[in-house]
Image (cartoon, helix red, strand yellow):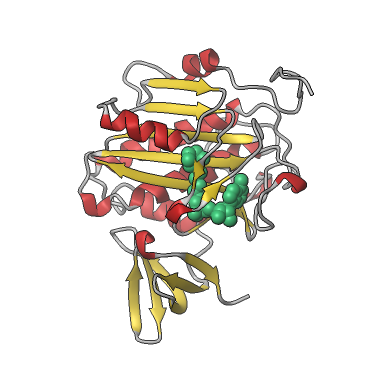
Amino acid sequence: MSESPYADLDRPPLHEAALRRALLRPGGLWTDLRVVPETGSTNADLVVAAKNGVPEGSVLVTEAQTAGRGRLGRVWTAPPRSGLTFSLLVRPDVPVTRLSWAPLLTGVAVAAAVRRVTAVGEREDRFRSGGDTAVDARLKWPNDVLVGDRKLAGILVEKVGDALIVGIGLNVSSAAGELPVPTATSLRAEGAALADRAPLLRAILREFEILYREWTRHGGDPEASGLRAAYTEVCATLGRTVRVELPGDRTLTGPARDIDDEGCLVVAGPDGERSVSAGDVVHVRPADG
Ligand code: BT5
């Protein structure tokens, strides 16, 4: 097998200089962007950077991750260059109670970018109808991007002082046999073969910037910033009956009614409505199918 990253024409490498040219501009959110061939975890790297005082807007992309983190000690695995594996560092000036909206905001950005970039004949308008959308990306509260019931992307947000490290793993060209779990999918598996990952990365970062600017401008208020409405529109969890697994083998089953101001899922359980926070949830599974 060749060592050159160019040997696999289905998986061309990402170009740091081109991405920097496209994304780093005066007054913009993104202040630095690096692409490294391999690292343990981009989240772990930016956690260190945050502690060292790196300013808001730093993006770290890797072509291969050897110790990708999920939530609660779980792992994220993907073959080199088969998808997007990156993290970003922001320092949102919003009340701490509203920070739980950050993973949800990220999900909205990823879903919007996937829909836009995979739509036939990529166009620049952001508000397209569902009819010409190639991949119907939806969100499972709190942090999964799904196509149908399969996971296309995972999001991990970690807090370090006033910084948030937002990590995103998204399967692009992974073949069915390369996906780590039967519940996973990729753009390729969904019929949207995308050789060049750069437009997708650019689209995610641009969508994130727009949503993040609005959200922080409104002090993290999900209502005033329009974030709740945007999230509700693409959320596959709301309206479904869910079984929420909580720590200590406890479960809560009932219809998922709402997302509250603090980003918690409101479930109508047998003893009335209860809000569960992402930090408390082990798994959310559909209970109605
Ligand atoms: C997540 O955790 O889904 C968050 C994943 C975040 C990964 C990114 S990659 C860049 C950045 N740097 C990091 O170190 N992490 C972030 P969770 O909800 O706990 O889901 C983890 C579960 O997803 C695993 O237990 C598997 O079941 C499944 N999984 C692992 N790899 C997957 C993949 N490539 N595609 C789909 N599902 C996967």
The image quarter containing residue 175 is top right
- Residue at 76% from the left image edge and 24% from the top image edge: 8
Give the quadrant of the N terminus: top right
Q: Give residue 144's position: percent from left, percent from top.
A: 52, 53
Between 137 and 226, the one lying in front of the other is 137
Q: Give residue 146's position: percent from left, percent from top.
A: 59, 54
The image quarter containing residue 285 is bottom right
- Residue at 39% from the left image edge and 74% from the top image edge: 248
- Decide if residue 137 is in sight here: no
Between 212 and 270, the one lying in front of the other is 270
Asked if 127 appears above or below 238 in the picture, the reply is above
- Decide if residue 225 is in sight here: yes
Asked if 221 appears above or below 2 in the picture, the reply is below
Q: Give residue 113's position: percent from left, percent from top.
A: 54, 38
Spot the residue most to the right. 1
- Residue at 62% from the left image edge and 29% from the top image edge: 197
Q: In the figure, is residue 163 to the left or right of 71?
A: left
Q: Give residue 52's position: percent from left, percent from top.
A: 26, 27
Spot the residue most to the bottom. 270
Q: In the figure, is residue 243 to the left or right of 222?
A: right
- Residue at 22% from the left image edge and 44% from the top image edge: 94
The image quarter containing residue 49 is top left
Between 24 and 87, the one lying in front of the other is 87
Give the quadrant of the C terminus: bottom right
Question: So how many labels did they put on this image?
Answer: 0
Asked if 23 appears above or below 162 in the picture, the reply is above
